Amino acid sequence: MDAAYIVRSGLLCIEAAAPGKHRQLLTLFYPGDIIQNACLPQLPAMTLSALGVAEVLRLPVRNFDALLASDVALAAHVQRRLAEQHARATLHAAVVGTLCGEERVVSLLMELALRVGMACAGGVACEMPLSRADTADYLALNADTLSRITSRLRSRGLLRQTARGRIVLPDWEGLCALSPFAGALVALHSGATRPPQAATVEA
């Protein structure tokens, strides 16, 4: 991947699989994110993939570096963006490494709502770009465990699935109360377009 990629729309992911091991979806990239080979570990069978329709700007590394060298403000912006992405990756590692299954699922639902959600009459609505298998991989959960967790959230009125690939979160504050990292999630994603309900959660 001898290039720099800038996500213009859609959602991208990095996945990898050690020989003889199950593949793992490691990182999500949202619009505005920057992907550089130098910022990624050299893992076996690592691939960059789009989760659905996405638009990506690709620049050869030498062109990207020359552009940054010629524009101090742009270089500063790129550094801030990469720092934010690193912070998000660190938070995701904490979510997977320290939280129980339900807390992991809730944290991901919060992240997606903050990034791609829209306020609606029934709560916060957003497209679900991850399949069940992708979600389970990203959260290091068994697919059956994930299904049981989402069923519990639906029965408690915290999650509603409408059309294919679309979800509604009817009780934003109730959902946030289930994630120990709710404040950190809001703080990290505060630069994204987010539903008004999200602003009520204190960092």
Image: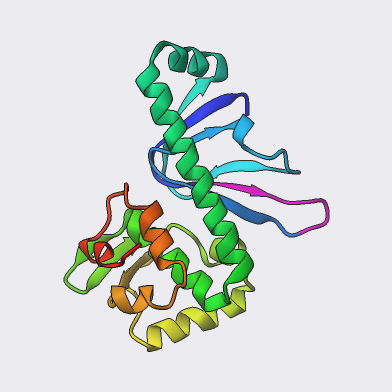
Q: Quadrant of the N terminus?
A: top right
Q: Quadrant of residue 56?
A: top left
Q: Nearer the viewer, residue 50 or 172?
A: 172
Image position, residue 165 (x, y; %): 39, 64
Q: Residue at x 38, y 15 (%)?
A: 71
Toward the front, the furthest residue is 203
Answer with left or right where residue 61 lies relative to residue 154.
right
Image position, residue 111 (x, y; %): 41, 60
Residue 187 in sight from this viewpoint:
yes
Q: Quadrant of the C terminus?
A: bottom left
Q: Quadrant of residue 47?
A: top right
Q: Is residue 75 above or below residue 91?
A: above
Q: Nearer the viewer, residue 166 or 169?
A: 169
Task: Please provide the residue range marked out in magenta.
Answer: 13-21
Image position, residue 95 (x, y; %): 55, 65
Q: Residue at x 49, y 21 (%)?
A: 59
Toward the left, the furthest residue is 121
Residue 14 falls within the magenta-colored stretch: yes
Residue 142 falls within the magenta-colored stretch: no
Image position, residue 195 (x, y; %): 24, 60
Q: Residue at x 57, y 72 (%)?
A: 99
Residue 128 in sight from this viewpoint:
no
Q: How is the image coloured?
A: rainbow
Q: Is residue 184 above or below residue 69?
A: below
